[in-house]
Amino acid sequence: MKAKKVMAMAMASAMILSLTACGGGNSSDDAAKGGETQSEEKATVNVVEPNKDAANTEKTDETLTVGLASEPSSLYGASVGKTENEEQIIGNAMLDSLVKFNYSTNEIEPSLATEWEWVDDTHLKFKLRDDVTMSDGTPLVADDVVYTCNKIWIEKNQTNDTGKYLVGATAEDEHTVVIEFNTVAPDFLKMMSWTNFGIVSEDEVNAAGGLEQISTNPLAGSGPYKFKEWKNGQSVTLERNENYWDKDYAGYYKEIVFTFTSDAAAREMAVESGDADIAYDIPVSQASTYAENDSVNTTIYEFGQTTHLWYNQGENAGATKDEKVREAIDKALDFDAIAQVGTAGFADASLSYWDPSCDYYTENYTVEERAVDVEGAKALLEEAGYADGLEVTALGLQDITPVLTVMQANLAEAGITLKIDTPDTAQFVEGAFGGNYDLICVGDTPAIRTPASVMPFLQKLNVEGPGMVIGGAKWTNDEFDSTITELISEADTEKAAELATTLDEMVKDQTVCSNLYPEMKSSVYAKDLKGFNTIERGFVDVTGFYE
């Protein structure tokens, strides 16, 4: 396995040059979901698994410096109807949600709410703490949750995942609130732990000058840190909330400073030089080279998202409408090589549509079924009328180029010419929305069973209506759509697993997509730091670090 990993890194380095690769990998012996062979590899590199260190118990006057890849346009995106990765990382330190999700134990825990219950399939009741102080010194009450839900989540976020599943909130008394959803999904409770569901008060918003103003001057919330300063183009500074309600929490750092550098190598060098403590979101192809550097810590981990190769079957599709063509492409691909390049050797090829972090995960392919079959691919192409060869185009951003290059070489062996189209982001989004491609690599995060996360590319709303997603097959049918809805709404885990297996088999039988590899995140941080924890979608939780 070590030789295999080294070879994959060499392949990636040769193809990538200055490009970044997609993905990363797990980091501990027991976290390797691809098989025992991965455990053997872990001894050869210094990779730290997140969510494993004990909680901090001390406070200091020191400052934590976090290097992010880009500067967000807002620090409270929900107030202006959007979310950005960097904004979620910063906002998580300032805003508390009703519940929180512990990614170490995989359990939902109390936060601003001490208890909760589903009143029925669409009404979720929360009992609030009575000892929470908002940033302006006023106590948290149910009306704050009602305001945040009705005036921010819903009114400002009707077209995104923050608001489109909500009907509204009502207060039963000063510390009891009921939130109503417009569809059935038990995992909405877990979704409520996400940063974009942080609670603010109307008084805080008004004091800041309104929703537009608070997006860049977020003196709001009840989190462990409070907003202090934003120097546009340079940094954002937060300061420890000395009146934080959770007395079991100790913020080690008095201040947290976020800086912004698009160059991943420069972010890592800042950690080595001592100018920064954390270089977040390093491409895995680069992070894997730092894993053997004794002067820094490197973490590489899965976060519940699997990359799929989708075959366009929509109105603008060409040869990929033919199932024989889709099967031929699938047979010609070397899934091991694709996974090795896509994850820099830290994970194996996916044997299911579902990510292993799903509680309903089952392997639906054998390793033998994933083996390359060039002759079988050629025979299928001949049956489809392409005995003399076929040309298809794959649409992607620059960071997927190394993976597409491997596919290009694979398909050439079967007589298929793959053209790689990597336009700028705006053109990519336009083409991906419109279905102007033959092949496209897109992943989803099904470990949380909400309409936005479970096979969104095969839901009728998204294929045919205003909820249209970027990429996918641009096609679905009634059986897919109804089974997806059942999976999302099913409260029983065993029944959910049966439905998930049915969907996996449907994808396999019709070759709607080819499952590639688990996506990864990776970061580099100072050697003496502990407490690398994650929140939703694998984002770093900056509030738990300590020395």
Image (cartoon, rainbow, N blue to C red):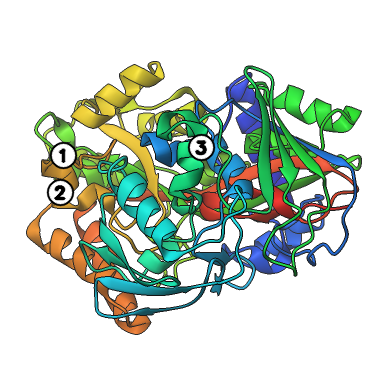
- Judging from the image, what secondary structure is the residue with disc 3 in? helix
Q: CA distance from mark 3 to mark 1?
A: 36 Å
**Circles 3, 2 touching at the beta carbon (< 8 Å):** no
**Circles 2, 1 touching at the beta carbon (< 8 Å):** yes
Q: Position of residue 14 (x, y in %)?
A: 63, 24
Dot 3 amino acid type: Ala
Query: In the image, is 533 to the left or to the right of 195?
Result: right
Residue 39 higher or lower than 207, as above or below: below
- Judging from the image, what secondary structure is the residue with disc 1 in? loop
Q: Position of residue 152 (x, y in %)?
A: 36, 45
Dot 1 amino acid type: Pro
Q: Position of residue 279 (x, y in %)?
A: 73, 35
> Where does label 3 land, which residue?
207
| Residue at the (30%, 62%) spot, across then down | 169
Residue 374 seen from this side: no
Q: CA distance from mark 2 to mark 1?
A: 7 Å
| Residue at the (30%, 29%) spot, across then down | 415
> Where does label 2 land, which residue?
461
Query: In the image, is 307 to the left or to the right of 244?
Result: left
Q: Earlier in the sequence, mark 2 or mark 1?
A: 2
> Where does label 1 land, which residue?
466
| Residue at the (55%, 65%) spot, across then down | 100
Q: CA distance from mark 3 to mark 2?
A: 39 Å
Q: Quadrant of residue 227?
A: top right
Question: Which residue is more in the foreground, 467 or 162?
Answer: 162
Q: Quadrant of the N terminus?
A: bottom right
| Residue at the (19%, 28%) spot, across then down | 434
Q: Position of residue 31 (x, y in %)?
A: 65, 65
Query: In the image, is 253 to the left or to the right of 389?
Result: right
